[in-house]
Amino acid sequence: MSESLSQTFLAITRNTTDLEWLQGALAPLGQVVSAGAGSLDELLALVDVTFANLVFIGLDREHVTTQCALIEGALEAKPMLAIVALGDGMDNQLVLNAMRAGARDFVAYGSRSSEVAGLVRRLSKRLPAVTPNAHLGGLTVLYGTQGNADGALIASHLALVVQKSGQQTLLLDLGLPLADSLALLGLESSFHFGDALRHLRRLDSTLINSAFTSAEAGLRILAYHTNDEPLERTSAAELYMLLSALRQHFQHIVVNLTGQADSEALRTFVSHCDKLLWCTDQSVPDCRRNLAVLNLWREKGMKLDHARLLVDRYLKGAAPDSEALEKSFGLEVIAVLPWSPEVRLSAKNQAQTLFSLAPRESLTQALRTLGERLAKRSEGLEKPSTNWLNRLLRTK
């Protein structure tokens, strides 16, 4: 995980309204992830995969005994964890119960954002530094709002380059239209993104090697299926569990998210990848749509230091040029991909890669150069060990 990225906090709240209030208050500091309905096993598993050291737990009179038992159980298993209770600040008995259970502090629902953020900053200074697993594989996300983008084409070629560099690589194709990467490579799959979510507890090397689609050079592909739930209905907690399992197995994961609407799930990918490639073209309407999401995330305090601009379907001499786009987006242009419509169409219709169909084309060379740049991020990583994952799965 990139050092520039935000911290993760876990929360068990009464409802989504309370969760959204907490997320808004702490947006400048990090992402608040729902830890579900209050299962101790689920909470501890999420602490392990998110490296969270601060958890918010909501209390109410009806369930206070169970909720305090959850606080005590979490602290018994993770003594260095800091727990902040949430509830009615006027209920002195509730506050007393929280403190007796081991909560570090108590925050009343609806408190001002500045108060909540100030409390978290003070607590963070007294907590041990978060140390992510150094053996986690690299994670690159390709995103752009436009649904007609060649996201699958770009992501599949980048993933192939990283795979051919000697790193075991996964292409996680969650972009729209669905499963275009499989069609582009002339492949079919019987195991999809939704299946992986349903089999989280079984997602080990055996299942990955037997069920994930295999492409050229050993590249693995996990894609959406029309029967899968929309991405926005996938919880951040589920994504954390899935990504942590996959990053234990693969040295690099390339995720295509082009065309997806803004959601907590999308922001989870964006907040925790090593490199965000923001894909746009020179079309003013597409630029406006992309800028609307980018500016919204900036207003919410999301950290985007790891984002770079990727200009696709680029036409020299047409406005706006790459320099103008770089200035408008406030992001460094990492690459421009030439339009080359005939080559793109031939690759799609013949289910061949550009590397085999048109290796000397400027588009092909640009994709290869960008892929090699991504590969350098994770080339020094050892092949991930599954010991940590196996320990996690045994606790479920």
Image (spheres, rainbow, N blue to C red):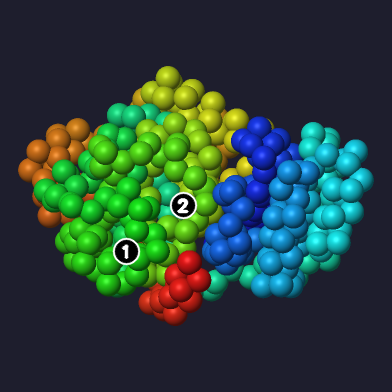
Name the quadrant containing residue 160: bottom left
Residue 340 horizontal side relative to residue 204, left or right: left
Q: Earlier in the sequence, mark 1 or mark 2?
A: 1
Kind of residue sitting beneath label 2: Leu
At x 48%, y 76%, the residue is 391
Label 2, on which residue?
Answer: 239
Can residue 338 be seen here? The reply is: no
Residue 122 horizontal side relative to residue 166, left or right: right
At x 52%, y 52%, the residue is 237
Residue 139 horizontal side relative to residue 12, left or right: left
Task: Give the vertical position of 162 relative to 107 (above or below).
Answer: below
Q: Looking at the image, how many numbered discs can be counted on the residues?
A: 2
x then y, percent, for residue 19: 66, 39
Quadrant of the image containing the N terminus: bottom right
Badge 2 density bin: few <14, some 14–19, many ≥20, Cα 10 Å: some
Secondary structure category for the residue under label 2: helix
x then y, percent, for residue 168: 31, 69
Kind of residue sitting beneath label 1: Thr
Task: Give the vertical position of 198 relative to 345 (above or below).
Answer: below
x then y, percent, for residue 320: 44, 26
